[in-house]
Image (cartoon, helix red, strand yellow):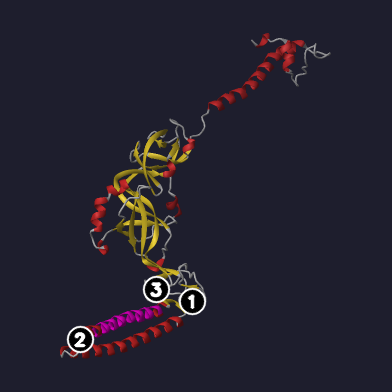
Amino acid sequence: NISTISPAFIRKSNIYTCCGQLSPPNNMHPHSPHPQVLTAIRPATIFVALVLCAIPACKEKETAKTPPPAPEVLVIEAGTKDVPVYREWIGTLDGSENADIRARVTGHLLKRNYQEGSLVKKGDVLFEIDARPFVAALAEAMSQLDQAKAMQLASQAEADRSKELYDKKVIAEKEHTNKVQLNQSNIAKIKALEAGVEQAQLNVEFCKVVSPVEGIAGIAKAQVGDLVGTSGSAVLTSVSTLDPMKIIFPVSEEEYLQASEQAQASLAMPLEKRPGLIEPILANGKPFGKKAKLFSVDRQVNQSTGTILVTAVLDNPGSVLRPGQFARARVVAATLPGAVLVPQRAVLEVQGTYQLGIIGPDGKAEIRPVQTGPRIGGEWVISSGLKAGEKVVVEGLQKIKAGAPVVAKPWTPPAAAAT
């Protein structure tokens, strides 16, 4: 009842009118005109003031009741395809043939005939050692051989003559026997000297250090003028055949037993007919482009690591791969038919568990735990908890709440967007 509001409330509310010659009550102003007019207008003025005060409060209540807009997320439909399951091992690349080049005679190095890091053929002369001492030794050995041959001719003639005299009973048997034995001794001496001449010839040939294999020659570790061929001399250089190339990797005993039948069947074939099943993945994460063939399996398991070394060979045109490089040896172990896949960025890992954001047909979100399988490129196999065709949140997973509506828009993979 507005008419019952006390003048004190009016004073506190500081409600006045600036028209109609009205003024505050007598106790607020010394000149209080027409109390009857003030009494007539006061209820209406108070009503208007109360209505104006109530409008902001109503607007605040209406604003509080207005729900926030639904978050926008990017989704993709879970697809299916046959997925290969890979097994990978860390391997080391090596040449199919590797030769450490050492000097076989002692002497001073005179010349280096190859370009470091270049391709050399089998039999190419890589280094030359001063051969003069060995040429002199060969000449001496040959002269001793000629002298021994001349002595043997004389002893042979004496032996032949003694036989005739012995047959005629002119000389004793002992004298004849001595003549024959002397000739046999000279023959044996000739053979020894012939071996010495052959060794001297080899020493002269060894002064030219040749490559035993075709391949890439490494950096020279000896310089011209060095004394090489001593007992403590180092390797002069190394030559490796890089085409084909070897990749060597260890597999566990369990993995070997699982694939032993297939490995034995492959090893029973000629090398050129063996299937290329091993794909090298290089350090840049890209496959090499050539697949390797199984070459050999080591004879024993390493007791300290429980692994066995497997060697495969692959073509290496242009000698792109080099010994010492690391590569992953990847093999298709099995195939998952009709596997359900989602982008890896859609999977949320929480304390060892995996979750997906699912948008139902009603447009509401769901946080669903799932079981994951192998990762294939940028996708992840979902082994359980997801059906093909369901909409999975890829971007905006942190915005959604279970049971809350969302605005779902299709997600475009980065590669497709770039295209």
Q: Earlier in the sequence, mark 2 or mark 1?
A: 1
Q: Nearer the viewer, residue 224 or 264?
A: 224
Spatial CA distance of label 2 from label 3 is 61 Å
On the question of residue 83 being in view, the answer is no
- Please tell me whether the stretch drawn in magenta is mainly helix, strand or loop: helix
Q: Residue at x 23, y 85 (%)?
A: 175
Residue on which the image places disc 1: 109
Q: Quadrant of the C terminus?
A: bottom left
Between residue 238 and residue 48, name the one nearer to us.
Answer: 238
Report the number of numbered marks: 3
User: Which amino acid lies under the numbered mark 2 shown in the image of this protein?
Assistant: Ala
Q: Position of residue 389 (x, y in %)?
A: 34, 41
Q: Residues within 10 Å of mark 2 (few under 14, many from 20)?
A: few
Q: Which mark is residue 172?
A: 2
Q: In the image, which residues are magenta?
A: 179-203
- 13 falls in the magenta region: no
Callout 1: few (<14), some (14-19), or many (20+) C-alpha neighbours within 10 Å? many
